[in-house]
Amino acid sequence: MNKSTLKSVSDSVRQHATNTYVRPAQRRGGQIFSINVGEVHRAVALRNRVPLVCQALESEKFLQANELKLISRTGPPSGQSTTVTYTYEFLDSKRSPSRREDPWNRLRGALKDVFAELGGGEAYLRDERERFNAADRSTTRESK
């Protein structure tokens, strides 16, 4: 296997880990998640490439691309086994992963400027209630 093939296999491992583990953890709003080397090795359909999977999951390229910090590695001392499990933590950034992916948090405050122009949310609701009650009173008078 030449160097460019190894690079593409490493890229495949990193892409699989990103799609299968990193993005779902972000969507769930988790700060910490784990990846097992054996699961990735099987999923990418590799044979005898455990060291390559370990290197790809420990690489600065993977960590930086996903804004991660490797916080622990469990497994044998060699660190080259299908039983190795890496635990990662999302780095603090301007927007935390949970806020970035959560639709409610993206929508929150969308009408803040509109309410400010109307004197705030409380003033808006008070005015709406007064209009509603005035309309209701006029309808009752007309029906009598």
Image (cartoon, grey):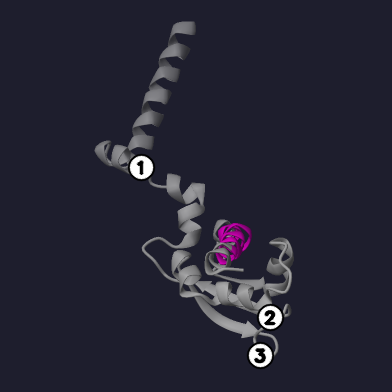
Q: Residue furthest bottom?
A: 77
Q: Residue at x 57, y 77 (%)?
A: 55
**Which residue is more in the foreground, 126 or 33?**
33
Q: Which residue is mark 2?
A: 84
- Tell me the amino acid under the disc marked 1: Glu
The image shows residue 129 at horizontal and vertical percentages of 40, 30
**Label drawn at residue 122:** 1
Would you say residue 140 is visible in this rendering? yes
Residue 12 falls within the magenta-colored stretch: yes
- Residue for badge 3: 78
Left or right of 5 in this view: 97 = left
In the image: residue 114, left or right of residue 79: left
Q: Residue furthest front?
A: 2
The residue that appears at 70% across and 68% down in the rendered structure is 41
Q: CA distance from mark 2 to mark 3?
A: 10 Å
> Which of label 2 and label 1 is nearer to you?
2
Find residue 44 and report its horizontal and vertical position in percent.
Answer: 69, 62
| Contact flag, marks 2 and 1 (Cβ < 8 Å) | no
User: Was residue 33 drawn as part of the magenta stretch in this picture?
Assistant: no
Quarter of the image where the N terminus is located:
bottom right
Q: Amino acid at mark 3?
A: Ser
**Whole-percent x and y of residue 21?**
62, 63
Stretch in magenta: 9-24
Disc nearest the viewer among 2 and 3: 3
- Considering only vertical position in the picture, is 47 above or below 97? below
Most prominent secondary structure in the magenta stretch? helix
Q: Which quadrant of the structure image shows residue 19?
A: bottom right
Give the Cα separation between the discs numbered 1 and 3.
63 Å
Which mark is first along the chain, 3 or 2? 3
